[in-house]
Amino acid sequence: MAYTLSPQALSFSPQLPFNATHNSPHVCFSFLNFTSSGFFNGERDFLWPISTQHPRNVLILTKCSREIGDYTEKGHIVSLFQILGFDERVIEDILGRNPALELLPVESIRSRIRGLQSIGLNELGLSKLIIKHPDVLTAEEVEFFVKFINGLEIKIESIQIERLLLGMEPRFIGGFDKKVNLLIENGIPQEKIAHVLNNVNLSKGICLKSYEEIQRLLTYLTRFDAVGIIAKRPSILNYDLDTQLVPRIGFLQKLSGGDTDAVGEVLNRLPAILTYSVEHLQGHVEFFRSYVGLSDPEIFKIVLVFPNVISASKKRKLQPRIDFLKECGLDSGEIYRFLIKAPLFLGLSFEKNLSHKLAMLVKIGYAYRTKDLVMAMGAVTRTTSEKLQEVFGLFLSYGFCCDDIVAMSKKHFQILQYNPGSLEKKMEYLIEDMDREIGELLSFPAFLGYNLDNRIKHRYELKKKIVGEEMSLNKLLSVSTKKFSKTKKQLVQVSCDMGKDNSNEINVKGH
C-alpha cells in the first residue's frame, strides 16, 4: 500500500474563538491519502485514530483513489461541529439538511458563527439554532441581519435575537433592516428604538409583516400620535391592523361621539387598551350602561380620565365598588361625578389599600354608609395609608380632636390627601408669622390647600403693609388672581398716596 501525507497531516488543530469550556474531548483530524494496491477493493472512507495529543484524538481520514482537497473542508466542518458539542448523528443530520455547508470554505462558516456570537448568541443558543435551522450558517439574509444589528447604535437583547432566529426560517428575516428604518423614518427616535425592538415580538411584529403592512399601520395610527403609542407600548406592532386595531379604535371612536383627539388622549394614556378585544370593551361599557345607569358620553369621560377602568374586573372590582356607592346613597349622577373626581377608587386594591383607609376614617368619626364617607374615601385614594395616619397625628398634635378633623375635612376633603410635611409648614407660618390662632382652620381649612410661598406669603406680606394684620384668611386667599391683581394696584396706589401725605406732613412741620 502506498500513501502520501497531506500538508495538514498531524498539524491541524481546530480552534474557534469560543470562550466556553467543553467537557467532551476535541477531535483533531489529520488527512492521509491512501492508494490501495489490492488490499482495498473500490473506494472507501476511513477515520483512523493514530495518536492522542493531550485530550484530543488524532484521526486519519482516508479515501482511496481521490484527491485529498475534496475532503479537507468536510473534515474541518465536522471538527467545527464536534467542538460545538454535536455528535455524529446530529452532524449527519445538519449536513443532510443543508448540503451547501460542504461546498463552503470552513473560514466562511467560522465567520458566520463569530457573527452570530457578536450579536449575543451564547454557545447553547448557537447550538440549538444550528440544529433547528442549519440554513442559518449559509443564508444570505442572516449575513445582512448580523451586519445591521452590529451597526445599530443601540443593542437588542440577546434573548430577543435568539427567540427570533429560533422561531422562524432565515428566509423570513430578509428586509428586517428596512422595516426597522421605516419605524425610525416615521418618528421613533433612535434612543427609543432599542426599547421598541426589545419589547415587540420581532417575528410577529416585524419579520412576518410586509414593509407595506407596517407602513399602513403607522399611517393609520398617525392621527392618534403613532410615535407616542408605539414607544410606550411596542407590542402594538404585533397586532393586525384590519382585524384587531381598526375595530378596537373604531369602538372607542363611536363611544366618544367621534372625538378623535379624545380617543388619541386615551390611547396615549393607556396604549394597552388596544390589547383588549372589542367584546371585552363592550362588556365594560354595557356594565356602566345597565348597572350604573350612565350614558355613553359619561362612560367615555370616565375612560378618558381613567383608562385603566377597562382592565378592572367587573365581578371582583367594579360591581362591589358600585354597590358600596349605592349603599352610601349615591344615585347615577352622583356616582358619575364621584368617579370623575376619584377614578382611582375603581382601581385600587380593597384588601391592601381601601379597607385600611376606610377603617381609619370610620375610627376618627365618619359614619358608615354615608355620602360624607364616600367623599372622604375619594380624597384618600390619592394618598397612602401611612401618610393619612401622619396627617391625623399632625392635627392631633396641634390640639385638634377627632371631631375637629372630621369637621374640617367635611368642609375641605382635600386636607386628607395633602403631604404632612407641607401641612406642618403652613400651620407653623399661620401661628408664628401671621400670629393667628390655629383654631381659625376650623372655619377655613382650605387655607392648607394654598401654596405657601406663591400665595399665602405673597398676599399676606402685601396686604399687611396696608391694612395691618387683621384680615380675613378667606378673603385674602380665595379671591381670584385677576381680581387680586386689581386690588394689588389699588393697594399700591393707596400706599403711594399715604407716602405723599406723610411727606407733606413732615414738610409742614419743618416750616
Image: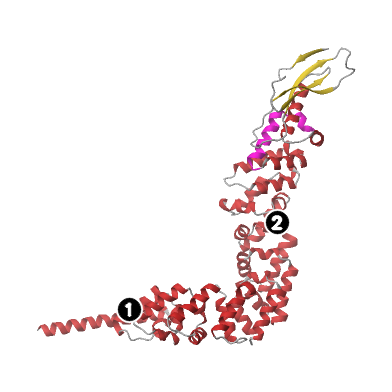
Residue occupying image coordinates x 40% and y 74%: 425
Position of 98 compared to 269: left or right? right
Q: Which residue is mark 1?
A: 462
SS label for mark 2: helix
Residue occupying image coordinates x 29% and y 83%: 466
Circle on res. 238? 2
Q: Amino acid at mark 1?
A: Leu
Image spot of residue 97 (x, y percent): 81, 37
Query: Which residue is more in the foreground, 453 or 15?
Result: 15
Quadrant housing residue 492: bottom left
Residue 207 at least partly seen: yes
Quadrant housing residue 66: top right
Position of 220 compared to 91: left or right? left
Q: Main secondary structure of the magenta part?
A: helix
Q: Which residues are magenta?
A: 99-120
Image spot of residue 295 (x, y percent): 68, 80
Residue 347 at least partly seen: no
Image spot of residue 44 (x, y percent): 86, 22
The quadrant in which the N terminus is found is top right
Position of 385 compared to 37: left or right? left
Residue 185 vs 345, above or below: the answer is: above
Q: Residue 112 lies in magenta, yes or no? A: yes
Query: Which residue is more in the foreground, 39 or 258?
Result: 39
SS label for mark 1: helix
Q: Residue 321 lies in magenta, yes or no? A: no
Question: Badge 2: few (under 14), some or many (20 or more) residues near its Cα, within 10 Å?
Answer: some
The quadrant in which the C terminus is found is bottom left
